[in-house]
Amino acid sequence: MAPSCRDALRIDDLPTPCLLLAESVMRHNIDRLKSRLRSLGVPLRPHLKTPKSIDIARFLMETPQGPATISTLREAEEFAAHGVRDLLYAVGIAPAKLDRVTALRRKGIDLAIVLDSVEAAEVVAARSRAENVPIPTLIEIDSDGHRAGVRPNEKARLTSIGRILHDAGALRGVMTHAGSSYALNTPAALEAAAEQERAAAVGCAETLRATGFAAPVVSVGSTPTAHFARSLTGVTEVRAGNFVFFDLVMNGVGVCTLHDIAVSVLATVIGHQPDNGWILVDAGWMSLSRDRGTARQTIDQGYGVVTDLAGKPYPDLIVVEANQEQGIVAIRPGGTASLPSLPIGAKVRILPNHACATVAQHDQYHVIDRSCSAAVSAVWPRFRGW
Amino acid sequence: MAPSCRDALRIDDLPTPCLLLAESVMRHNIDRLKSRLRSLGVPLRPHLKTPKSIDIARFLMETPQGPATISTLREAEEFAAHGVRDLLYAVGIAPAKLDRVTALRRKGIDLAIVLDSVEAAEVVAARSRAENVPIPTLIEIDSDGHRAGVRPNEKARLTSIGRILHDAGALRGVMTHAGSSYALNTPAALEAAAEQERAAAVGCAETLRATGFAAPVVSVGSTPTAHFARSLTGVTEVRAGNFVFFDLVMNGVGVCTLHDIAVSVLATVIGHQPDNGWILVDAGWMSLSRDRGTARQTIDQGYGVVTDLAGKPYPDLIVVEANQEQGIVAIRPGGTASLPSLPIGAKVRILPNHACATVAQHDQYHVIDRSCSAAVSAVWPRFRGW
């Protein structure tokens, strides 16, 4: 039960650094993508690697049983223990991990895996036969040269893998992830990336079907392309994870405003070096992460944008450098604002470059809400590990 | 009790990714610095922020009670619970943290703090009087413009802080950290940085003493300067942390060889993109960290150097890019070696850019030893948080 604002734990009571989550902002982000996908007629299979929290997963999933996407078997096991039953493990399978996959499947969890090679397909096919129950498998498609996967023009590789899986009853379809979309920053480029992602996946599924193999699932997704796709014809599900929180990288890509960023790190001022124009805070890379994803963007946000306790950014104020437990806050290079007066003990919030990396440095979300902004309405645990 | 090699958990049994620690390498690193400091006549106050493990702390400390350095109050509380009684919290104090500091002191833990401002000194002095027991405090000195601290030429600031602490019985001395030494890479430059660090700290202590304040402690240290100082005259203790494991950044600075790096991430090959010359592994930035500290060095090691299971680096093979749970392994730009044959399921080890950041992504050290290299002799937990 959420306590009343008057009785609640308050932001002022929290030891710093710690992680804040603005629940209403998160809900808005979730509603926005779900409503978008509804209009395109495709369901969401949210990627739970970002939150790693069952409390947040329940906002993201269509039902308490899923569907959902995960990036580690630890996530699969944790979420399965909390009742999630429809999971896609969206990282190329290592043969030694099949024991844990089949253990979950024997418990009734519909855990699907991905792979992109004949070697891995042969292992999965052999295991499917040995278990006498196929392990449903998606063939990973490389739609943009970003990572892993069969390229759309590698038809021989695609159909060889497809045949091995099909013959073992293990072929479920194809999946792709347009990771290169993170490097874009115009609506036209993002729309083109989304269409490239869609076309690659649908085309490969059609190639498999034309060869005589059932490939019912066509799974695509990345946070940028999910928000810019104009058509998802032929796609059966969209995966995205980062959008639940958004971050400065996604702001630089053009997918969200600063106001849409749902997580921040609460920090305390611990010193000043006035000759350098520096304010020292107790949030270093241990709490912010070492992610410098905005360094490659038009606006380099250092280790994060500094806001007041209500979430309003101080003009031009960023974390310019980070030690393990200290951040150096200053006006950004070229910035014209003057340094705000923040005495020792003052608290600030820091918006993350990359939410997935920043939240991974923490074990709890301290949930706050705009309507009751100084109160902490809940503390939601997160897990980690593999 | 360590199991025999024959019975032991073996590297092959470990789920990947996971963290390996070569105990003999770590012991060598500890012996090397301790023997060096012994010859210079100064004790080590090891920084436990790097290992965050009582098992490793016991190798580092001179006695089970300390002394030691920590970077968070969580570390202070954890190590105190395991019997460590002499601790320096080496990050500028935030006023709201004094409750936890005094709670530990009331339990008999000699926890000292640091600060660099009149404002913080006044808070600590008032608290020392209110508690009727002084909180021992070191004044942080900025010996190289890297972070926080009073500059050696700011005598008025130094003596003002000194007076406030002295009058409250809370002044214990000075401390500095030559963080800029991480950017150097020649013995001459490192020796000069060590001398600058020593001279700044000793000079400030002498200024305080000349003003009539006792300042018995002169605490200096960083891993590079600790290994290159030629004289530590006037210094009473040396702090260093990273050296326990070393890493690729320290290799680039010239403080260690690749052979001295005690930690690595064990990973499994999950795919290949032969047209790109890529091998995909299941270690991404979640297990390696986002640290790219070698990007600013002469040799950019990407997200880490790839070795075989015995720890021998494959020529020119590094992790060139990292997604959350996938690393892309390839020959380094300009490298002339050819890609080794590593089939799906093969295991490799990855040496970290920055050990402090990489080990922070893990909850256990899997301890291995050269003499029994396929066996895991122990699993040591680590903690995190604030």
Image (cartoon, coloured by chain):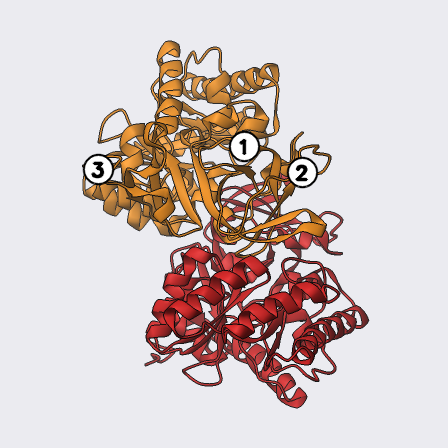
Chain colours: A orange, B red
| Nearer to us in this view, B1 or A366 | A366
Helix, strand or loop at disc 2? loop
Label whose residue precedes the other's in the sequence (3 or 2):
3
Q: Where is residue B66 in the image (x, y as percent from the top left)?
A: 45, 80
- How crowded pointer 2 is (Cα within 10 Å; few <14, some 14-19, many 20+) is rated as some
Quadrant of the snapshot with the N terminus of chain B = bottom left
| Nearer to us in this view, A79 or B110 | B110
Quadrant of the snapshot with the C terminus of chain B = bottom left
Q: Tell me the amino acid under the disc marked 1.
A: Pro
Disc 2 designates what residue? A332
Above or below: residue B41 compared with residue A372? below
Q: Which chain is mark 3 on?
A: A
Disc 3 designates what residue? A3
Disc 1 designates what residue? A313
> How far is mark 2 from mark 1, CA to CA?
13 Å
Q: Residue at x 52, y 56 (%)?
A: A325
- How crowded pointer 3 is (Cα within 10 Å; few <14, some 14-19, many 20+) is rated as few
Q: Which residue is drawn at 61% across and 37% down?
A: A317
Image check: A215 left or right of B226?
Answer: left
Note whether residue B209 is visible: yes
> How far is mark 3 from mark 1, CA to CA?
28 Å
Image check: A6 left or right of A258?
Answer: left
Helix, strand or loop at disc 1? strand
> How far is mark 3 from mark 2, CA to CA?
39 Å
Q: Tell me the amino acid under the disc marked 3.
A: Pro
Label whose residue precedes the other's in the sequence (2 or 1):
1
| Nearer to us in this view, A373 or B190 | A373
- How crowded pointer 1 is (Cα within 10 Å; few <14, some 14-19, many 20+) is rated as some
Q: Tell me the amino acid under the disc marked 2.
A: Arg
Report if the CB atoms under discs 3 and 1 are less than 8 Å apart: no
